[in-house]
């Protein structure tokens, strides 16, 4: 039997659910289609938002011949065959719309092969991708296609889809059942209808109740493409929630990551990075706790070790923040690249051999515990570059004490250098 999602595929633009900002009255894509201005397009959006359906409707609206291919299974030979057939149709003034699903799966040469057919009008190409086209689609091909971003369907959109499905199945459902199916769908109409079709087998007296939904569906998966943009967006959200001192949002994004199958050691490594980059010396214990969380994951694994990651995320979120060491390190690295051949001052060099001593290595080095004032007066930077102050302690947490200590050290160094200069002068 034909799946419910296929049976309910919209036949007109007016039946299409969602993407109102593109297809509503007077909106850009709707106006272009009503004026029969067919053009190549790139649809970027998550699964189940109607990319394939919309491409079919556009072909119908434009009286174009529709050809659907998937970049997972299609190759150069398939594209060339479609192009040859399209040229024959053009002789009869019929355009061909090629819908290429998962266009990001084509490599660079395969994507380049599409260019001449798009440029000369042999094919109108609609590519669909769930991945960021900035990274996955060649710039040359992107420049010849209008990008349209399709968004996840809203709860209201999913409700509309589900009620259409219920009518097709001659069922009714309680509000709680519809809400449960909506939550399950995650904005994916195909997923929603698939779940409804399964749950329909548990209906009693042609009505679905919440218990029927619970009986029919297994625990919801939060899975995502672990190497894709969505994964890195979730990780970015966790990092920025920690940096923004929001422990509750930090826990939510951590749960999304771990529930979706993220490598817990990768998450632990990112938490260690946050402890260094965003907490820093405002709370030196943050790094110790992050490393302890990583060790706990190594020792206990998942799910037992998840609590250690949660504890770490909350600690980092509520800890005082300082990126002063992070900023200082970036500046020091930049100078190290700029002055990468600057020689170590002779007085700072070790002299393990007699020859080195004769060359003056280590001569006049002021050992702090023997000569504190001389130690402050001597130069530690190369002679060929200006002395810098990379690290400026912050005013939060433990770094407040560091700030006072640093101010005192810099005062002592300034006075010692002034006195040394006077003595030499």
Image: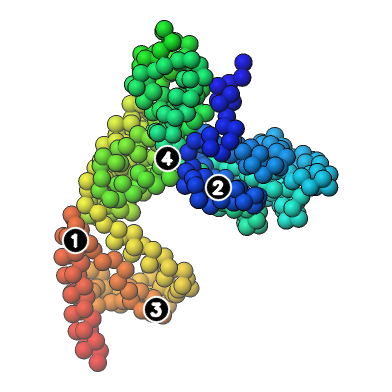
User: Mark 2 and mark 3 in contact (Cβ < 8 Å)?
Assistant: no
> Which dot marks residue 385?
3
Distance CA(mark 1)–CA(mark 3) = 29 Å
Looking at the image, the residue that sits furthest to the bottom is: 425
**Which is nearer the N-term, disc 1 or disc 3?**
3
Under tag 1, what secondary structure? loop
Distance CA(mark 2)–CA(mark 1) = 55 Å
Give the residue number, with chain letter if any, for mark 4.
266
Under tag 4, what secondary structure? helix
**Image side of residue 335 versus residue 374, left or right:** right
Looking at the picture, tell me which residue is in the foreground, 167 or 84.
167
**Which is nearer the N-term, disc 3 or disc 2?**
2
Distance CA(mark 4)–CA(mark 2) = 44 Å
**Which is nearer the N-term, disc 4 or disc 3?**
4
**Which is nearer the N-term, disc 4 or disc 2?**
2
**Of the two numbered discs 4 and 3 in the rendering, the one whose residue sits closer to the viewer:** 4
Q: Residues within 10 Å of mark 1 (few under 14, many from 20)?
A: some
Q: Residues within 10 Å of mark 4 (few under 14, many from 20)?
A: few
Give the residue number, with chain letter if any, for mark 1.
395
């Amino acid at each position: 039997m034909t799946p419910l999602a296929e049976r309910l595929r919209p036949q007109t633009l007016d039946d299409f659910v969602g993407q109102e900002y593109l297809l509503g009255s007077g909106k850009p894509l709707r106006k272009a289609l009503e004026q029969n201005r067919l053009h190549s397009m790139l649809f970027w959006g998550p699964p189940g938002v109607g990319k394939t359906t919309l491409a079919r409707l556009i072909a119908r609206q434009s009286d174009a011949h529709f050809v659907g291919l998937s970049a997972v299974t299609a190759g150069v030979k398939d594209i060339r065959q479609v192009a040859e057939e399209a040229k024959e149709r053009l002789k009869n003034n019929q355009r061909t719309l090629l819908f290429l699903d998962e266009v990001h799966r084509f490599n660079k040469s395969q994507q380049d092969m599409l260019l001449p057919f798009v440029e000369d009008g042999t094919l109108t190409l609609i590519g669909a991708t769930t991945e960021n086209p900035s990274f996955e689609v060649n710039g040359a091909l992107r420049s010849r296609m209008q990008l349209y971003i399709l968004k996840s369907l809203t709860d209201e959109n999913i409700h509309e889809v589900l009620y259409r499905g219920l009518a097709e199945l001659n069922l009714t459902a309680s509000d709680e059942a519809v809400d449960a199916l909506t939550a399950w769908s995650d904005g994916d109409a195909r997923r929603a209808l698939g779940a409804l079709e399964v749950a329909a087998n548990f209906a009693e007296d042609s009505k679905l109740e919440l218990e029927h939904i619970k009986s029919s569906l297994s625990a919801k998966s939060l899975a995502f493409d672990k190497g894709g943009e969505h994964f890195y967006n979730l990780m970015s959200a966790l990092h920025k929630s920690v940096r923004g001192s929001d422990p509750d949002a930090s826990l939510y994004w951590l749960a999304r990551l771990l529930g979706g199958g993220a490598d817990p050691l990768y998450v632990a490594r990112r938490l260690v990075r946050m402890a260094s980059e965003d907490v820093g010396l405002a709370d030196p214990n943050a790094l110790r706790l992050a490393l302890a969380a990583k060790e706990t994951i190594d020792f206990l694994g998942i799910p037992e070790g998840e609590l250690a990651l949660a504890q770490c995320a909350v600690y980092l979120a509520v800890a005082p923040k300082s990126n002063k060491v992070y900023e200082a390190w970036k500046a020091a690295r930049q100078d190290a690249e700029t002055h990468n051949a600057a020689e170590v001052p002779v007085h700072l060099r070790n002299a393990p051999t007699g020859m080195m001593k004769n060359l003056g290595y280590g001569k006049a080095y002021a050992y702090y515990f023997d000569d504190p004032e001389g130690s402050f007066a001597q130069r530690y930077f190369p002679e060929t570059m200006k002395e810098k102050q990379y690290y400026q302690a912050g005013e939060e947490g433990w770094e407040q004490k560091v700030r006072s200590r640093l101010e005192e050290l810099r005062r002592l160094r300034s006075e010692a250098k002034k006195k040394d200069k006077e003595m030499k002068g």
